[in-house]
Image (spheres, coloured by chain):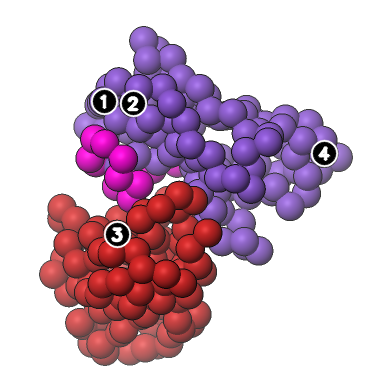
Chain colours: A purple, B red
């Protein structure tokens, strides 16, 4: 069955970077894109970006200057990195996937979420 | 960016009631709207896609409708287990945006 499992730190120092790995099973990264979404009490759900099956990326312009999404198809892993975190980046970060190939961006599968707190 | 304005923010209902939530898009999004349910401590769960298609395994008391800018999500007969926050989302154009959520509580 399709699974997305996230791993990454829960605490990040202000101005430092956040790295989260999404390890997938039950499907191939060469067939499906993987998206990143975050959720905070103040801003709700925000779509951050996607790495498509071919390796190209699309980012939310609000985060483009400090966001990078890459992947290793052979290891079934997607890597999320956001730089220069501040307190208002405190949120739960999710990786997510559509059940369709192509460019659909509605999500039937979600990782368990990574609660990230930005604090000294 | 397309803004999804979701109303109401909060609903307090009794089991057996009918519930309607609306989302209004700031510009036409065709039928590219999904609806999610999120229970406390869980990831969102997909209920509806393409505005009116029920996802696999979703009970038929959950329905969606709409096209263009105006969308509606309905629970025909609320059950106690439907306690959750509900969100709409457009995937018509990037950045893909969400409504602010409707918290459903059961009396």
Residue B24 position, x and y percent, is 41, 76
Q: Is residue B73 visible?
A: no
Find disc 3 in the rendering and name its residue: B32
Extent of the magenta region: A99-112
Residue located 34% across and 26% down the image: A53
Tell me if B37 is positioned left or right of A78 in this view. Answer: left
* Quarter of the figure with the C terminus of chain B: bottom left
Disc 4 crowd rating (10 Å Cα; few below 14, some 14-19, many 20+) is some
Query: Toward the viewer: B63 or B98?
Result: B98
Chain holding disc 4 = A
Residue located 82% across and 35% down the image: A15
Disc 1 crowd rating (10 Å Cα; few below 14, some 14-19, many 20+) is few
Tell me if A70 is positioned left or right of B30 in this view. Answer: right
Which image quadrant for residue B83?
Answer: bottom left
Q: CA distance from mark 3 to mark 4?
A: 37 Å
Tell me if B4 is positioned left or right of A109 in this view. Answer: right
Find disc 1 in the rendering and name its residue: A31
């Amino acid at each position: 069955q399709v699974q997305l499992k996230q791993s990454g730190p829960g605490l990040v120092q202000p101005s430092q970077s956040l790295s989260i790995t999404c390890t997938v099973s039950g499907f191939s990264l060469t067939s499906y894109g993987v998206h990143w979404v975050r959720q905070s009490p103040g801003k709700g759900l925000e779509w951050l970006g996607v790495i498509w099956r071919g390796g190209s990326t699309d980012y939310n312009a609000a985060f483009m200057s400090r966001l990078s999404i890459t992947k290793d198809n052979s290891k079934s892993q997607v890597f999320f990195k956001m730089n220069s975190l501040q307190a208002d980046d405190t949120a739960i970060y999710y990786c997510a996937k559509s059940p369709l190939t192509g460019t659909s961006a509605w999500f039937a599968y979600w990782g368990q979420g990574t609660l990230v707190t930005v604090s000294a | 960016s397309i803004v999804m304005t979701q109303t109401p923010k909060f609903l307090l209902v009794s089991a057996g009631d009918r519930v309607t939530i609306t989302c209004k898009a700031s510009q036409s999004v065709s039928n590219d709207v999904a609806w999610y349910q999120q229970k406390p401590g869980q990831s969102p769960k997909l209920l509806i896609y393409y505005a009116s298609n029920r996802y696999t395994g979703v009970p038929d008391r959950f329905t969606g409708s709409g096209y263009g800018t105006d969308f509606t999500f309905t629970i025909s007969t609320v059950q106690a287990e439907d306690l959750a926050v509900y969100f709409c989302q457009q995937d018509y154009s990037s950045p893909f945006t969400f409504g602010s959520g409707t918290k459903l509580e059961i009396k």
